[in-house]
Image (tube, helix red, strand yellow):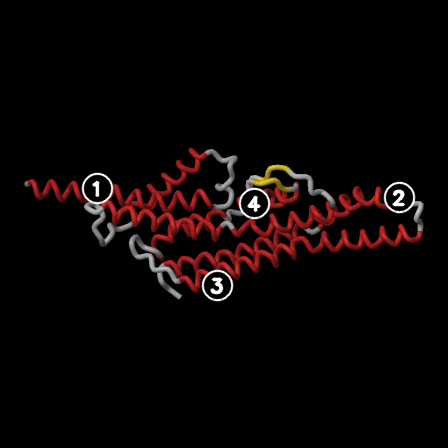
Amino acid sequence: MLSVVSSVADLAVEKIELFILILVRISTIIFLLPVFNFNTIPTTIKATISFLLAFMVFPQLPLVSFAIANSPVFFFMIVLEQIFIGLVIGFTASFLLHFTIMAGEWIARDMGLMQGTMNPFIEFQSNIFSIFLPMLLMVIFLVSGGHYFFLRVLFESFQYIPMGNFVWDTRSFAAILILLSASSFVVAFQFAAPVMGAIFLCTVTLGLMNRVMPQLQVWLLGLPLKVFIGSFVIIYTMPLMVQLFNANFEQLQRALYAVLKAGGGGG
């Protein structure tokens, strides 16, 4: 009788520990995902969402094939493993907005609007376009239902990388990060190129006007003219920016699944 009670108790403890492991991985990912990593979202909201998602995932997972109830040290190592997996997935997902922040910095620099204000995306002083462009595209992203992809990745991460079966392919992961970084730089340039080109032509025109009519204070006219031209080009090219954002998101989807395969030891 005592052996049966002990077995039942061990099973209950193992289920609780399994739920904790699931919660650790999910909460780490949630706290790093785009939108959720803003300081403007209360920590209690993030924790509640993480708990609800863990509660949904838990019944779908079988019990782990290793004993964790009688080994606190081993359980702590598995917790660290789940934190690392969550950090990798969340960090990869954060590339969704990196290029928009970079493009905003370039646009504001050429338009002469580098006045700093707190940027919730990078928690640092930034300019208005590095805040406006990510927020605008994130609203479009949420309205189009793109956030469901991250939820699917969160659920499927337990299939690609089961508990205690973390075999990281470091070469694949390094290659993915290098490609994402290079892609962010290229897409950021494509994002800002129309505005940068228009501002460059405006600057050249003002320079020629200054040579032809030195008495005309063209540089006093330059700042409002650059702001007007840059704003007009941004509004006119917004559909193109949305297309670039969607193309970058598709590439990010492939990268995230490649990360999951690398985490499971796949090539």
- 21 relative to 148 in the view: left or right: left
Q: Earlier in the sequence, mark 3 or mark 4?
A: 4
Identify the residue position indicated by label 3 in the image.
175
- Which of labels 1 and 2 is toward the front? 2
Q: Residue furthest bottom?
A: 267
| Label 1 CA crowd tier, 10 Å (few <14, some 14–19, many 20+) | some
The front one of 231 and 40 is 40
- Which of labels 3 and 4 is toward the front? 3
Residue 110 rendering spot, x and y as whole percentages: 73, 49
Q: Secondary structure at mark 1?
A: helix
Identify the residue position indicated by label 2 in the image.
217
Please report contact status of discs 1 and 2: CB closer than 8 Å, yes or no: no
Identify the residue position indicated by label 1 in the image.
13
Residue at mark 4 to residue at mark 1: CA–CA distance: 41 Å
> Image point 93% across, 53% down: which residue?
212
Q: Earlier in the sequence, mark 4 or mark 1?
A: 1
Q: Earlier in the sequence, mark 1 or mark 2?
A: 1
In the image, is residue 36 above or below residue 89? above
Identify the residue position indicated by label 4 in the image.
138
Query: Tag 4: residue type?
Result: Met
Query: Tag 2: residue type?
Result: Gln
Q: Earlier in the sequence, mark 1 or mark 3?
A: 1
Residue 132 rendering spot, x and y as whole percentages: 63, 42
Residue at mark 2 to residue at mark 4: CA–CA distance: 41 Å
Q: Quadrant of residue 140?
A: top right
Residue 181 rendering spot, x and y as whole percentages: 54, 57
Q: Quadrant of residue 201?
A: bottom right
Residue at mark 3 to residue at mark 2: CA–CA distance: 52 Å
Query: Tag 1: residue type?
Result: Val
Please report contact status of discs 3 and 2: CB closer than 8 Å, yes or no: no
